[in-house]
Amino acid sequence: MILTGTTGLAGVIGWPVAHSLSPRLHNFWLEALGIDGAYIPLAVKPENLSLALWALPALGFKGANITVPHKEQALALVEKSDSFAKRIGAVNTIRVDEKGRLIGSNTDAYGFIKNLKSEARHWRPSRPVLVLGAGGAARAVCVALLSVGVREIRICNRTHSRAEGMAEEIGGPLVALHWGDREDAAEGVGLLVNTTKLGMTGAPKLRMPLTKLPPSAIVNDIVYTPLMTPLLASAGERGNRIIDGLGMLLHQAQPSFTAWYGKKPKVTQALRNHVLGG
Ligand code: ATR
């Protein structure tokens, strides 16, 4: 790839950022669609975030993704943001508009629902959902679920006050339950989502007894390293439909790409293979 003065630049801003799969993903689409563009990892320390964001228009960037730990701070720095970003309290995509303004959005909720619907077409929002965790990822998942009309979301988090705070802030049919009650909380749900880091390579295992989980329930882990987490493995063994965490990452990237480059890329098996290729 030859970069020129007219190459359309975008990137991902994080700290650290080396682990991010987004460059593999967006550069695959740029190449597949024959677009003169480049997507670059940008390691930016938290104290430099405002300087980095304000430099994007000056450097001619079309925009950027924002990742850990900057998503919340970015919301306060952009000039405008969409309703998902406001409700989630975080920005994961910035587009530089024609006037050089920073327009923030959050595509995580879209990515979660789009992935869920494409992996489990039979899923309906009528049954309760159990969400494990109450961090940034949980907020995006809850806002996504509410946007499609889920009537009851049970949140189990190790720190109960955080679950209560999230339920209060987001509003709607969110119920904060104790971490110790997660086994019982699975009774009658149509969907179980792990949004904690438990089960990720290097993190402790998630201990989630599935005895009360209906056999018809879908289990979605947003952890994608490994793809087959211990939670998904045990859910799959007892016959539950399982959805891994990579799909949400791929689907959240699509509206960001479209915002910068004006074309709608496809989430395909070839993309999955490329992103996993290491
Ligand atoms: P993110 O923004 O990616 O969601 P986060 O805000 O750090 O990350 O949230 C991490 C989630 O994993 C939280 O729900 C956290 O629980 P606490 O609110 O009690 O910290 C959960 N988590 C992390 N380590 C955990 C552990 N050992 N046991 C249970 N939950 C854990």
Image: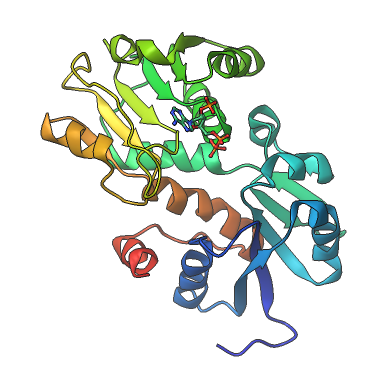
Image position of 229 (left or right of 151):
left
Q: Quadrant of the C terminus?
A: bottom left
Residue 97, horizontal then vertical, whole percent: 79, 57
Residue at 71% in and 61% down: 63
Rendered image quadrant of residue 65: bottom right
Q: Who is closer to the viewer here, 104 or 90?
A: 90
Image position of 255 (left or right of 238):
right
Is residue 209 visible in the rendered image? The answer is yes
Residue 141, horizontal then vertical, whole percent: 49, 31
Residue 167 sits above or below residue 63 on the image: above
Residue at 43% in and 36% down: 113
Image position of 125 (left or right of 43):
left
Residue 158, horizontal then vertical, whole percent: 47, 21
Is residue 151 visible in the rendered image? The answer is no
Rendered image quadrant of residue 49: bottom right
Q: Which residue lies furthest to the left in this view?
A: 238
Residue at 36% in and 69% down: 274
Residue 251, horizontal then vertical, whole percent: 45, 49
Residue 8 sits above or below residue 202 on the image: below
